Image: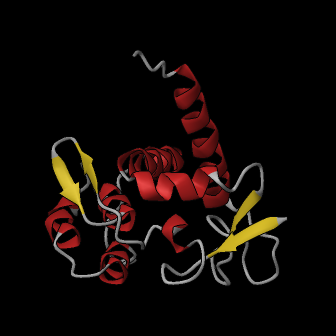
């Protein structure tokens, strides 16, 4: 069975980057993975001044809108690093929040697919032909967490 997710309020919504499961990265608290991810697009760029505004955005939708403004200059290496930036943030999210970590682990070996009708890179797109990179990251994070748990020895 394939598990589809998309909106934060739907079943498996905790897999969405818009879910309010904050992360700390390099001593800074980000309210959602989406806030963090959008801000990282501008690190070291001429438009880095937008980062505090993305950080302070009231909602992940607002953070996404700020980060998607096509008139701003992205960091030069963005296409090379964006998938790794996302993976690190998603891993941090599931290592930080035990409740959603359990949800992820309970998906077993099921395929996870971001059911975005518009995103063919992170999601599956309207016709299910997208690359589903977010789903692949979640599957990879699920496996990494399993390995970490198997290495954990409980001493009595």
Image coordinates of residue 60 in percent, x first then y, are: 34, 77
Q: Quadrant of the N terminus?
A: bottom right
Using the rendered view, name the quadrant where residue 6 is placed.
Answer: bottom right
7 above or below 41?
A: below
> On the picture, is 149 further left or further right than 61?
right
Q: Quadrant of the C terminus?
A: top left
Q: Residue at x 60, y 59 (%)?
A: 134
> On the picture, is 63 further left or further right than 28?
right
Q: Residue at x 49, y 83 (%)?
A: 9
Residue positioned most to the front = 156
Image coordinates of residue 27 in percent, x first then y, are: 15, 43
Image coordinates of residue 65 in percent, x first then y, are: 36, 81
Q: Nearer the viewer, residue 154 or 43?
A: 154
Image coordinates of residue 35 in percent, x first then y, are: 31, 66
> On the picture, is 32 further left or further right than 12?
left
Coloring scheme of the render? secondary structure
Q: Nearer the viewer, residue 123 or 22?
A: 22
């Amino acid at each position: 069975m394939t598990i589809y997710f998309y909106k934060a309020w739907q079943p498996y919504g905790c897999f969405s980057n818009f879910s309010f499961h904050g992360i700390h990265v390099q001593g800074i608290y980000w309210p959602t993975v989406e806030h963090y991810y959008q801000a990282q697009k501008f690190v070291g760029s001429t438009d880095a001044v937008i980062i505090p505004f993305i950080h302070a955005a009231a909602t992940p939708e607002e953070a996404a809108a700020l980060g998607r403004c096509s008139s701003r200059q992205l960091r030069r290496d963005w296409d090379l690093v964006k998938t790794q930036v996302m993976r690190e943030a998603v891993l941090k999210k599931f290592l930080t929040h035990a409740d959603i970590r359990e949800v992820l682990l309970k998906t077993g070996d099921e395929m996870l697919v971001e059911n975005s009708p518009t995103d063919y890179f992170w999601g599956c797109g309207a016709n299910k032909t997208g690359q589903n990179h977010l789903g692949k990251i979640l599957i990879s994070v699920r496996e990494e967490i399993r390995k970490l748990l198997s290495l954990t020895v409980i001493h009595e």
